[in-house]
Image: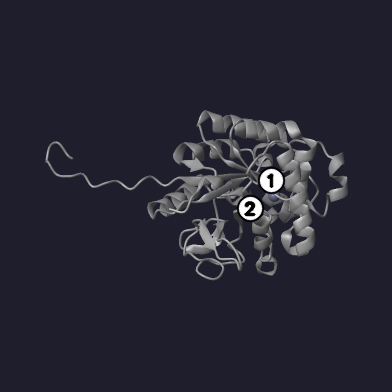
Amino acid sequence: MNRQTGTATPARPAPVVNFLSIDVEDYFQVEGFDQVVREADWERHEPRFHLGLEWLLQVLDSVRIKATFFVLGWLAERHPQEIREIIRKGHEIGVHGYYHRRIDTQTPESFAAELRRALEVLRGLGAAGIRGHRAPSFSITPAAAWAWSILRDGGLSYDASLSVRHFPAGREPWTRPDPGPQRLQLSGGEPFLVFPQAYLPGLARFPFAGGGFFRLYPYALTRWGIRAWNRRGVPVTVYVHPWEFDPDQPRFPAPALRRWKHYVNLETNREKFAQLLQDFSFRPLGSYHEE
Ligand SMILES: [Zn+2]
């Protein structure tokens, strides 16, 4: 009730809480460098993901935000302490595969085996109740849509690998004309939740709010995009990687475009991301229940 006029104050809609995800992998494991760093040679490279991870955990503590960490099984097996620290701080653990292999280059059998192996490692470190998955490079493409049933049959309840490049909004399997969480009706079972890659309002083919797009675009554009979706009641899923907060990482002699995508604006990313955490509210993906 408004005391001065005696009229009822209209109820304000609850502020939209966005989703924050971190894909935990190292700088030498990204798809952009797969021609210069072979999977078999990963062991030879200096691990550095902990540098960006420590900074992330600290900045998230300072703003009291919990996030979802999609962890690569290979890394978790070799660096258990770092993963236990994520769990100890109360963040959600999801799975990012065992090796960093695109799903659309695998068979259903090899994908299922890799998923089982990664889940086993993560559960062994104390990650209980793992519910979510993100594919390397958003690689659950139309040719690999079988992966969703395998995830569900493996006991998971959501995926965050739906790319705007392969599935423009408004067409199957997108069920919503926006990048908010959506239900996927898989044959023979419970509905499965999908958190799509976010795209700029009005520009369904233009991803934003994550990875290289977040580093490349001026922060004002990202802020405008998230605000515009939030005003419509739509939460946005943000994704980042620990190596994006490590500007001193070694440089690889990869083709120019791949180098540019990986290294662009690493120097300013900590500041930019800290600002994002000040401007918006976030929560882990697994805390979402259909409202
Ligand atoms: Zn990845």
For this rendering, which residue is in front, 48 or 82?
82
Q: From this viewpoint, is residue 251 visible? A: no
Q: Nearer the viewer, residue 25 or 182?
A: 182
At which x and y percent is residue 112? 75, 57
Q: Which residue is mark 1?
A: 263
Q: How far apart are labels 2 and 1 at the CA level?
A: 33 Å
Work out which quarter of the rendered image holds the N terminus and state it. Answer: top left
Q: Is residue 47 above or below residue 204?
A: above
- Residue 272: percent from left, percent from top: 54, 39
Identify whether 60 is placed above or below 120.
above
Horizontal and vertical percent for residue 131? 61, 48
Around disc 1, counting alpha carbons within 10 Å, would you say few (fewer than 14), some (14 to 19), or many (20 or more)?
some
Residue that appears at 74% across and 52% down: 115
Disc 2: which residue = 156
The residue that appears at 72% across and 47% down in the rendered structure is 119
Q: Left of 140 or right of it: where is 231?
A: left
Left/right placement of residue 149 relative to residue 27 reads: left
The amino acid type, in three-letter code, at marker 2 is Leu
Q: Nearer the viewer, residue 236 or 114?
A: 114
Instruction: Tell me if 36 is positioned left or right of 275 in this view.
Output: right
